[in-house]
Amino acid sequence: MLKRLLPVVCLLLPLSAALAQTEPAAAPPVQEADAEAPPETILLVGQRPGPGMWKISKDDHVLWVFATYAPLPEKMEWRSQQVESVLAQSQEYLTLPGAHGHVGFFRGLTLLPSLIGIKKNPDGATLKDVLPADVYARWQPLKAKYLGKDDGIERERPIFVADALYGAALKQSGLGYGYDVTNKINAIVKERKIKKTDTSIALEMDDASQMVKDFKKSSLADTACFDKTLTRLESDLDAMRVRANAWAKGDLEAIRKLSYADQETECRDAMRNADFVKNQKNWQNVKERVQEAWVSAAEKALSTNVTSFAMLRLSDIVGPEHYLDALKAKGYQVVSPD
């Protein structure tokens, strides 16, 4: 409940996730549902396997890494015989890396009154007051197209408005966050009673109630987050469909080639660099600590199990902060999917 009530915490986490995968060497080939791919701007539907998994190994111990990605076609049905085959052999499943605020349940209930109005701009300011005039002008047609006549949203902070706008635009464009893929994997893990290891870290709060109050009073450098979200919706929706189809067909190279305005980094940085976070000693160096926790869990799984299965975001594998490079530097063999 508190994760939903503390958007401050939620926005410290990556804002999107979707998936990719492969098979072990002996796995049978996947048969795609459609014999012929439709035009790239038309979203693929039907059963799709997604791309392949990364193989990390040392001696005879293997960790298969399944890369998440979003957005994905909302009407696509994900099904991978290869992933199911790997999970059938796995002794342990490592969840996606992340961070979450740690607040006791009863202590958390005391926060409820202070959470009222947490999404609003300080001092009753509106978007028109806090945004540059040119950015606000660009917001107006996108608001009308994706959110309609919602006057209340004009009083919310740009970072929350950007998130609402982006989600509405994806839905209207037939795209989603790929939760169906993650849910299916979790269902398989539960059904097979595979050991599940949470790789996320807990962020202790010195004074959660005071932190919420500080957030409500503080300004955020979230104009860049809002601006890049507008840019992405103005210019990237067709390319989003191309990348979503590329994932569905297993074409990682196509995803890599298509650059786009990375609003997620700007939005996360707006939160991570805010004063209310800097004042929390346990909330420092979160990005580095999250990566270290996942790498540590991966090493432990590799030393303990013959076969393990893990998930990472594609950006954590092919992006500038490559989680698997850390394992390669420690002497593990890393093989990318074809």
Image: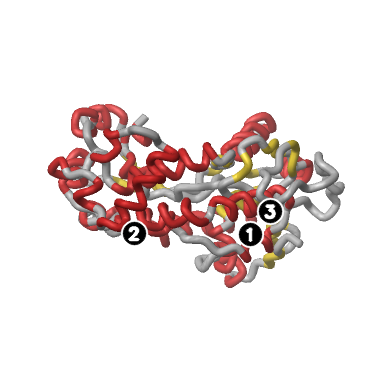
SS at circle 1:
helix
- Residue drawn at x 64%, y 53% as measured from the top left: 242
In percent of width and height, residue 172 lies at: 53, 37
Quarter placement of the N terminus: top left
Left or right of 208 in this view: 87: right
With respect to residue 290, does 163 lie above or below? above
In percent of width and height, residue 179 lies at: 57, 38
The residue tagged 1 is 255
Tell me, yes or no, whether the two marked residues, 1 and 3, touch with CB atoms within 8 Å: yes
Quarter placement of the C terminus: bottom right
Residue 306 at least partly seen = no
Mark 2–mark 3 distance (CA, rounded to whole Å): 28 Å
The residue tagged 2 is 224
Mark 1–mark 3 distance (CA, rounded to whole Å): 6 Å
The residue tagged 3 is 246
SS at circle 2:
helix
Mark 2–mark 1 distance (CA, rounded to whole Å): 24 Å
Q: Camera-side residue: 239 or 1? A: 239
SS at circle 3:
helix
- Residue drawn at x 59%, y 39% as measured from the top left: 174
Three-letter amino acid code of the residue under disc 3? Ala
Q: Residues within 10 Å of mark 3 (few under 14, many from 20)?
A: many
Point out the residue furthest to the left here. Answer: 123
In percent of width and height, residue 139 lies at: 35, 48
Name which of mark 1 and mark 3 comes first in the sequence: 3
The quadrant where residue 288 appears? bottom left
Q: Camera-side residue: 155 or 300? A: 155
Q: Residues within 10 Å of mark 2 (few under 14, many from 20)?
A: some
Name which of mark 2 and mark 1 comes first in the sequence: 2
